Amino acid sequence: MRRYDFRGGPSDKYGAVKFHRKRSTVGAGRKHKILSGKRMAGLMGYKLVMMKGLNVWRINTKYN
């Protein structure tokens, strides 16, 4: 949702009944393959994330 700026469905608060997000059709009609650039689920970003300020509780010396 955040990757391609998609929007969610209607809220249950405002009368949405039997609404489920689904993938629907993804491939081309004749080529029998998914075209490159099709917006589908996957990784967002390529950078490693480092968390600062976390406390180390213990170090398992058997596996580390």
Image (cartoon, rainbow, N blue to C red):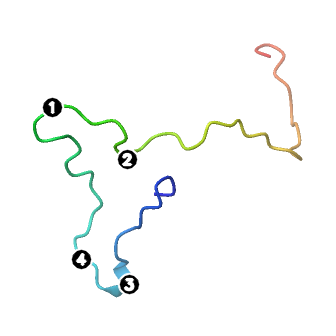
Element under disc 4: loop
At a point 45% along the width and 57% down the height, the residue shown is 1
On screen, residue 61 versus residue 2, left or right, reads right
Q: Indicate which disc, 3 or 1, sits on the residue closer to the N terminus.
A: 3
Residue toward you, 5 or 61: 5
Disc 1 and disc 4: Cα gap in Å?
34 Å
Residue 32, image x, y percentages: 15, 31
Disc 4 and disc 3: Cα gap in Å?
10 Å
Residue 7, image x, y percentages: 41, 67
Q: Indicate which disc, 4 or 2, sits on the residue closer to the N terminus.
A: 4
Q: Are marks 1 and 4 in contact (CB under 8 Å)?
A: no
Q: Indicate which disc, 2 or 3, sits on the residue closer to the N terminus.
A: 3
Neighbor class of circle 4 (other Cα within 10 Å; few <14, some 14-19, many 20+) is few
Element under disc 2: loop
> Which is in the foreground here, disc 4 or disc 2?
2
Residue 15, image x, y percentages: 29, 85
Location of residue 52 by image quarter: top right
Disc 2 and disc 3: Cα gap in Å?
29 Å
Disc 2 and disc 1: Cα gap in Å?
17 Å
On screen, residue 33 versus residue 5, left or right, reads left
Element under disc 1: loop
